[in-house]
Every structure is written in structure tokens, then in C-alpha cells.
Amino acid sequence: MQQIISSFDPANDGWQYMWVIVLVGAAALGFAVNKFIYIVLKSSKGRGVMMGNIANLLKAGKYDEAMSVAGAHETPLARIIYAILSRRDKGKDGMTEAMDEVFLTEAPRISRYMTMIQICASVATLLGLLGTIYGLIYTFDAVANKPAAERPKALADGIAVAMATTFLGLIVAIPLLLIQGGLAMQAERLVEEMEEKGLKIINILA
């Protein structure tokens, strides 16, 4: 671990790759936090309770109250339900059109920037590989051109660069891919739920 830490020192070869990998990881973490807040904390908050209240109000024929409940929540699912209820007098086609309009706006917001996390993970891996290639080139150059007395240190430095960059690239990439996969599953579930609940309410009101 001490060798990894020392690889960030500008006095050592290959330090540029280490810092670039860290910057890429930090950027991806920013995207991940943004999506976590939007998907898990904002878009998913209280939707089960909301749907239960709306379902009870619809069964009782209290459509205006159900619309007020949906309007009080700032989630994609609530916006779709609100749009449907606000056009209930337009028939099934009007409600479906209202749902589609909101869906086309909200669904891309849920999945936005998700690909950037995966791209950053891939870039971190490739940067680690690039650092490895640099370290190997440095090692081969040492064997070919360094005096015999300097070769052991040069070989050790080259191998250290090769291993440290690969290690850091994977350390950054693997958690990012796991985070991206988890967020993608949550996003897909939200989008499917928006469509499912919307169609159920349309069928109830039609």
C-alpha cells in the first residue's frame, strides 16, 4: 500500500496516470451521488403510501382529492398520476395521451447520466492499462539502455508503475460498475412502475 501511495508523488514516473484515474473516479462518483439522490431519495420516497391513499380515494370516487394527493408529491410517478386524473374527462385516449406526455419527460430524467458512470469505469480501467503499458516500456528501456548498476532500481520503478496503475484502475472501476448496476436496476423499476400504475389508473377511470 505504501508503494501505491508513493505512486502519486510527482517525483515518481507514472504519477500522471494515478491522478487522472482518481479524477475520473471522482467525476463518476459525482454522477452516482446525483443519480442516487434523484432515484432513491426523491423519486422513490413515499410512493407506496401515496399509491395506497390514491387507490382508496379512487375506490370512493373522490377523484379531486386523489388528484390533490398526487399533486402534493414531487415524484415522476405522482406527476403521471396527476396528469391522468386531470384529464379524466377526456376519456381513455385523453388520459393515455397525458400519461405519454409526462412519461416522455420523466423517464429520461431517471436514466440521465447513468451511462456516464459506466463510461468513467471503463476509462479508469483503460487508464490503468495505459499506465501498465507505460511501466513496461520504462522497464524494457531500462534493460536496454541503463547501466548495469542502475538497472535493478529502474526495473523496480517500471514494474511499480505497471502494477500501481492497474491496481488503482480496477479499484476505481469495480465499485463504479456495481453502483451503476444497482442504480440502473432502481431506475428500470421506477420506469416500469410509472407505466404499470398509470395504465391501471386509466383502466379504472375509463
Image (cartoon, rainbow, N blue to C red):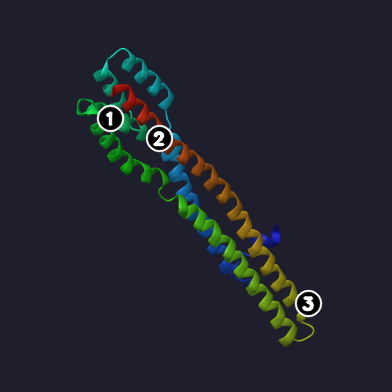
Q: Is residue 144 left or right of residue 45?
A: right
Relative to 84, is 172 on the left or the right? right
Q: Amino acid at mark 3?
A: Pro
Residue 177's x, y, as percent? 56, 50
Give yes or no for contact between labels 2 and 1 (Cβ–Cβ under 8 Å). Answer: no
Q: Indicate which disc, 2 or 1, sits on the residue closer to the N terminus.
A: 2
As helix, strand or loop, the secondary structure at mark 3 comes to helix
Task: Tell me the residue that label 2 is attached to.
Answer: 43
Q: Which quarter of the figure is the C terminus placed in?
A: top left
Extreme-top residue of the structure:
60
Distance between the Cα atoms at labels 1 and 3? 73 Å
Q: Give residue 136's quadrant in the image.
A: bottom right
Q: Residue at x 26, y 29 (%)?
A: 92
Amino acid, disc 1 = Ile
For the N terminus, the quadrant is: bottom right
Where residue 36 sits: x, y (%)? 46, 41
What residue is disc 1 on?
A: 84
Q: Earlier in the sequence, mark 3 or mark 2?
A: 2
Residue 135: x %, y % from top left: 66, 73
| Residue in the foreground of this view, choosing between 10 and 49 | 49
Between label 2 and label 1, give the one nearer the viewer. 1
Q: Tag 2: residue type?
A: Ser
Q: Where is residue 175 drawn, in percent x and y? A: 59, 49
